[in-house]
Each structure stands twice: as C-alpha cells, then as structure tokens.
Image (spheres, rainbow, N blue to C red):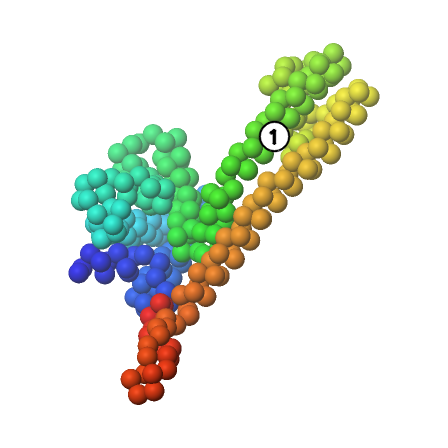
Amino acid sequence: MIQKRVWDILDVAPESDRVSHTESVFMFALILLNAVVVILGTVREIEQDYSAELQAFEAFSVVIFTMEYVGRLWSCVVVEKYSQPIVGRLRFILRPESLIDLLSILPFYLSAITFDLRVLRLLRLLRIFRLLKLARYSTALVLLIDAFRSRRAELGVTLTLMLIVLTIAASLMYFVEYEAQPDKFTDIPTAMWWAVVTLTTIGYGDVFPVTPVGKMLGGLIAVIGVGFVALPTGIISVGFVEELQSFKKKLKKQQEPTTAKCTCPHCGKEIAVVLQSEKG
C-alpha cells in the first residue's frame, strides 16, 4: 500500500530501513542548514551579497518541507487513531508535531501576500522555529520532551511556588526601598523585574537595594533563588533519567528474540524454538 510506505519513509524508522533512514538524515541536515541560513541572513553584508542564493535555498527548503507535510497529512490515515479521512486528518493537523511542521512553512507563504516590512521581518524570524522539527529526528530531544510531559505536575507546582515567592519578594522590596529609590522601585510590577533577576541569580545590576534592610532582604531572596533554580532542574533530570531507562528497556526487549516452547515428537521433551526478533 502506497500510503503505508510513504508514512513509513517519513516516520523515523530504524537504520534497517535505508530509505527512511536516509530521509531522516537529509531532513536533519536541512533543518540545521536552515538555522545557519537564518542566522547568517541577519548579517547585512551577507544578505546584500548573497540575497539570490539565500532566497533560492529558502524556496528549496520550503518545497521539501511542504512535500513532507503534505505527505504526512495524506498518509496519516494508515495509523489507527487517524484512520478517518476527515476527522483523523484534522486530529493529525492539531497535534503539536504537525503544528510545528506547519509553522516551518507558513511564514514563506504569508510573506507572499504582505508587504509590510515589520511583518516580513517577523515572518523571517519565525523561520528559526524550524529547529523544533529536530525533536522528531533526535532521540535525546524526544526523551527530554517526554521528561517534561511526565513531570508537568511537579513542574507546575514549582512554577506556582516561584510566582508566589516572586510576588512576595517584589512587594517587600517595594515597601523597603520606595522611599530611598522612588525612581527605581516605582511600584510593585517594576519591583518584580528586580525579583526575577535576583531569584534566577542573573543579577543585571541595573536595579539594586541601597538600604540596610533592603540589602539583607536582597541577600536572603538571592539565596532562596539558588534553591528555586535547582528545584526544576532536579525534577527534569530525574524525569530524563527515568525516560532514558524506559527507552533502553524497550530497545533491549525489541532486540531479544521471540521464543516458543514446543514438544519434540520423538523424545517428548519441551524445547525452546527461536522464532524471530521483534526488530525483524
């Protein structure tokens, strides 16, 4: 079936499928080259001297990405959850991976119907989001995304706690520093900028406390910030390790040969017969 073969080629298949593996390597390289071209395209001299070449590469890339998107959309019905021609394809379009694919080609087509320089600049910048397509071709990125998904509840709690501490820290610093620096800590929303750079341990230095109480409070908040930065990092690390272990177990299971027990017709003993490996 042609649709099934197209889906298998465009999907990330094992190296045993040479056509699919070659397509994956080609798309991986093309995505990386697109990121390089977008970055170099912001250099005025390069944009002026190689404008035709950059536009030709952009057109070539969009053609390839469009063919990939259309091919996936056409062949997705071979997957059970997308089997309905209309509803299934709509469900396929709305999944995150498909939205990223659409976002990678949409700026090119939208730029053809608008002449506003600010809009065109924004659309060109959106091309950098093609890097998100790499998640499909990188096992490490897929595992990292899965780690975020599996730990979203814990990360949500951590984010909520950070917002609470951020609000409290900004409010306290506003009341402590307002009289000494009315031009720096004008209100609580402005004080939140200081709280953000302090809690994240960035510390730009553009706004800082000058009163003794403010300095003590700032030091305390900075220490608390170290813990808050480490907390989500630890959660994600644990999630990534768990996903990696799960992936290794699946891979090991796929490589194990399938065996079946049968009885020898001559001696009556049970023997294990290797049928085939799940990897094929």
Q: Residue at x 36, y 35 (%)?
A: 120
Q: Quadrant of residue 236?
A: top right
Disc 1: CA contacts within 10 A as few (<14), some (14-19) or many (>=20): some
Please name whichever residue, 6 or 272, is drawn nearer the observer in this view of the structure: 272
Against 270, residue 51 (above or below) is: above
On the image, the x and y values in percent for residue 262 come to: 33, 77
Q: Residue at x 58, y 49 (%)?
A: 238
Q: Quadrant of residue 33?
A: bottom left
On the image, the x and y values in percent for residue 226 come to: 69, 37
Q: Is residue 165 visible in this depiction of the protein?
A: yes
Report the amino acid beneath label 1.
Met
Please name whichever residue, 86 or 176, is drawn nearer the observer in this view of the structure: 86
Q: Is residue 115 left or right of residue 216?
A: left
Q: Is residue 124 left or right of residue 81?
A: right
Q: Residue at x 30, y 57 (%)?
A: 10
Against 55, residue 158 (above or below) is: above
On the image, the x and y values in percent for residue 45 come to: 46, 46
Against 34, residue 217 (above or below) is: above
Which residue carries the number 1 mark? 162
